[in-house]
Image (cartoon, rainbow, N blue to C red):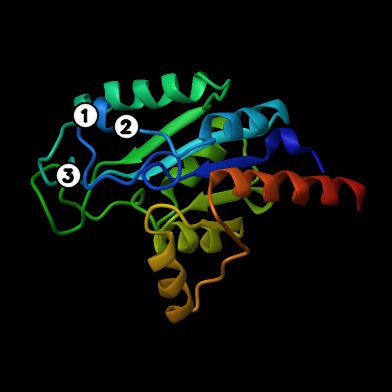
Amino acid sequence: MNDRRIGVFLDRDGTLNDEVDYLRTPDEMHLIPGAGSAIHRLNKRGLITCVISNQSGVARGFLTEDDLVPIHARLRDELARSGGQLDRIYYCPHHPTEGKAPYNVVCECRKPKTGMLQRGVDELGIDLKNSFVVGDSLVDMQAANAVGATAVLVQTGYGAIAREHCTLNSVHVDYLAQSIVEAVDFILITLDGAMKA
């Protein structure tokens, strides 16, 4: 298996950084312990790392797309302290019913739809079926299922609630990880096994 075209798609809030109700400023950005070194381990393996994040706070008027720029700069800076680098940060600013134009629309990028994953295919040549989606919510796991990627549910953020939601909605989870650190352990072990097969 050629892992250079394998992607790891990562939810942002509750997965890489602490869950904050509509995070609005860089000062509210605090990494989950070990997140930076976990991303660095993926980087060292040549895996493509992409954030995929629903940011309906933009549609709701809590912040603007311009406000996301310094927030994502802080995310990159914090990860870089431990050598972690992201290839892309994708986000969806829309909501189908809440908020104001032009953001209150039905779109193809809001998870569980797969538009952000497809951008990874289009821009980076990622093979989705051999890739991974790591997140703390039902919609993350639904998006993974929709493209045939391996679904990894972390127990940080909303993970405990999401586990119940996945069970109730018959949404498949391949692996339940305590945090991003254990999720990366699973990913690398899985890839090692696939390469030996």
Q: Nearer the viewer, residue 141 or 41?
A: 41
Exactly how many numbered labels are in the figure? 3
Task: Give the mark nearest the N terminus, 3 or 2.
Answer: 2
Compared across the picture, whether 1 is left or right of 100 comes to: right
- Cα distance in 3D space between marks 2 and 1: 7 Å
Please name the amino acid that badge 3 sits on.
Tyr
Please name the amino acid that badge 2 sits on.
Met
Residue under the point 65% across and 33% down:
42
Q: Nearer the viewer, residue 6 or 177?
A: 177
Compared across the picture, whether 165 is left or right of 120 comes to: left
Residue labelled with disc 3: 103
> Residue 197, relative to residue 171: is it above or below?
above
Residue under the point 9% across and 44% down:
101
- Looking at the image, do the residues carrying marks 2 and 1 touch, with CB atoms under 8 Å apart? yes
- Cα distance in 3D space between marks 3 and 1: 20 Å
Residue under the point 53% across and 43% down:
9
Residue 188: x and y in percent read 73, 43
Q: Nearer the viewer, residue 145 or 31?
A: 31
Please name the amino acid that badge 1 sits on.
Thr
Residue labelled with disc 1: 25
Residue labelled with disc 2: 29
- Looking at the image, do the residues carrying marks 3 and 2 touch, with CB atoms under 8 Å apart? no
Residue 126: x and y in percent read 62, 39
Residue 100: x and y in percent read 8, 46
Q: Nearer the viewer, mark 3 or mark 2?
A: 2
Residue under the point 56% across and 22% down:
82
Residue 147: x and y in percent read 56, 57
Identify the secondary structure beneath mark 1: loop
Identify the secondary structure beneath mark 2: loop
Residue placed furthest toward the front: 33
Identify the secondary structure beneath mark 3: loop
